[in-house]
Image (cartoon, coloured by chain):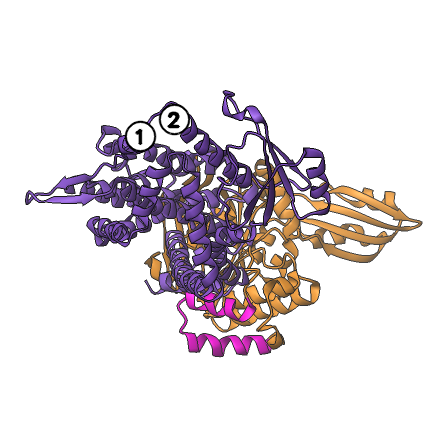
Amino acid sequence: MNKLFLIIQREYFSRVKKKSFLIMTLLGPLLMAGLMIVPVWLAMRDKTDHQILVLDHSGLFVDKIPNTKQIKFTYGAESIQSAKAKLKDGPFDLIMEIKGDALNDNKTTPVLYYKKQPGLSVEQYISNTMENILFDYRLQGDSIDLTKIDKARRPVEILTLKVTEEGKDEKTNTEINMAIGFVCAIIIYFMIFLYGSQVMRGVIEEKTNRIVEVIVSSVKPFQLMLGKIIGVALVGLTQFILWIVLTLIISTTVNSILFKDQIADTMKHNTQMEKVMKNDLTAGIDKMEKVDSPNEVIELFNNVNNINISKVLMCFAFYFLFGYLLYAALFAAIGSAVDSEADTQQFILPVTIPLIASFIIAQSVVTDPDSSMAQFFSIFPLTSPIVMMVRLPFDVPVWELSLSMVMLVVGFLFFTWLAGKIYRTGILMYGKKTTWKEIGKWLFYKG
Amino acid sequence: MTPILEVKHIHKNYASHVALKDVSLVVEPQKIFGLLGPNGAGKTSLIRIINQITGPDSGDVLFNGERLAPKHVDFIGYLPEERGLYKKMSVGEQVMYLAQLKGLKKADAKVKLQQWFKKFEIENWWDKKIEELSKGMQQKVQFIVTVLHEPKLLILDEPFSGFDPINAQLIKNEILELRDKGATIIFSTHNMGSVEELCDNIALINKAEKLLDGSVKDIRKKYKSNTYNITFRGNLIGFTNALWAGAELLDKKSDEDVHTVTVKMLRQNKPNDLLQAVISNSEILAFNEIVPSMNDIFISVVENKTTLNTQSAFTE
């Protein structure tokens, strides 16, 4: 036991002290914070101002296209030739010519002249706005009352209510459920890969450094394998916690200090844009406003509360831990069977197939969380860490959850035992290209 | 005295081949025991069984009279043939780790390590990374780690490979000193020079079987083929004629009137009988017995088991 502790200690500190750990720990949150900040920053940066001169020969659009913060419309009646001269010397950088028959053609084709190509959003804004104006114009032409149309068009939102044991209705939200399940599953997936392959590399390193025989003359090979798996797990845990803490710190500081004003600005602007871009103008605005209202946000949080957060977190910790342990043992066995990382491919593939398959299965589990396929794969130990996490927010029966957990622990014990057998023989095999057949034989060697 | 190690009828099979077949050995305490054999003979398999890295399919190993158990690993020091260290770790951290894995307390390990580092004059390596050291330097560190916990039984697999002559001598002296202090050393090699120099007893393994064991002195005596070299001045034909039916001329070399011949004694004849026969007509310059080197014995035993058996039947 004491020796196992020594191994864990070495595995942990030798990794934590590495420069690459420090770099990854710092870089990870920067990347994650970057993922949160960059879109905002891009949205802010990408706005170049446009001055557009509109030559509307139909007269329908004159003074009707609303200006935005970046796009200002000026209306003129001169010929296109003289307008093009203005493009050269300013102040306009875009000229849009709308042909006179725009009112009656089935398709209206305005021509946009530019010196420097405008972004897609500019074009989209113009075409959406014009479509809306044309839509209203045509309806009015057919003497249809616009207000009636607005009245007729009503958005439909489904309110899903769960009837609890006590007969009370409880509000649930399928989308949030899905999101939480998937985020947990993705984290488990990445952590298994990231740290499982670290275990594998550690084993290969010991093998190529030829230190492994010295060590197994002092401790049992199984102890060495277990020590490594646990040591790396602790490294993963340390890194994970540091990532969360650092990400929160970085993103909140950056957001609150640097971008405070701009973000509020951009947000407001974005909603404005979206509002206008909605084909269905009025209904769209309705919807947007609804989401923006504080009540809706509070409701959103209420929904999150309805999914038993502590249950999800506990299951996450459980599936994360045992999923990692199970796969790390398999990765350790792979590492022991090869002489260099380059040889690992043929063995890694079969191990990763269940992981990747889990995700494909998870897609269909979301659409039907109680299908027999969902049941099977959320209990089968190689896929359960991911599939069960996706299923979990949809209220899995207690017996299924317990069975799945027991199966995972059993699976972990079984695969670790199996991996231990391969590992024990593999670490002492040098310079031989290992095949699956050979690994099969190792399982039957006597300790 | 109880043997420190007793190997009894060990069998070990791997899927497709037999690694050890009914191998038995006795290692006396405070002796240097040579485990000899060509590559792939089964030496490493046997050593791994003694170190409890693998287990035998059948048979027993006794350590100091007790059946081998996990607690014994702390009394054994093992320097494998395929040996190395963590490249990225510093020397100091590494030796402390390995010492503690052998059951030493942190403080004890530190004191002992410092003594050894001083002895080998490598104190300033403590903070260096292993990858900064040469192969020979790494071997020194490995040797220290192997002997640090003062094992009763030291198992060295090809200990001199990778050492330059100066360091090899240093290690040889250390091995002898450790034996004098009470350690038993098993040492596996195919370098026969070092066997003659160091070993008290040997066992020879080939193709999974033990072919021969005993003390180096006895074995060399046993494999003497009763052959002698005689250098003399005189007439070669006269000399040959003088050899009576009790001896056979195997080889001759002449340099003007000085001749060197190799003669094999037949039956129970003694060298003196031969000398008496030839001394009257030649001037004897040198006379010596040809004692087989361990190398010769090794090669002849491994290459041809059967010839050797008839030969030994002859000598007996």
Question: What is the three-letter code of the residue carrying label 2?
Answer: Leu
Q: In which quadrant of the rendered image does the N terminus of chain B lie?
A: bottom left
The residue drawn where x is 65% and y is 63% is B136
Residue B273, percent across and down?
71, 52
Dot 1 or dot 2, earlier in sequence: 2
> Mark 1 highlights which residue?
A149
- Local SS, label 1: helix
Q: CA distance from mark 1 to mark 2?
A: 10 Å
**Chain letter for the part of the structure drawn in orange:** B
Where residue A250 appears, x then y in whole percent? 45, 63
C-beta proximity under 8 Å, tags 1 and 2 = yes
B93 magenta-colored: yes
Q: Residue A407: which quarter of the image?
A: top left
Circle 1 residues within 10 Å: few <14, some 14–19, many ≥20: few
- Residue B161, position in %: x, y? 63, 56
Q: Relative to B256, is A164 on the left or the right?
A: left
Q: Which mark is residue B75?
A: none
In the rendered structure, the answer to whether residue A123 lies left or right of residue A253 reads right
Label number found at residue A139 = 2
Q: Position of residue B241 (x, y in %)?
A: 82, 42
**In the figure, what tint was chain A given?**
purple
The kind of secondary structure element at disc 2 is helix
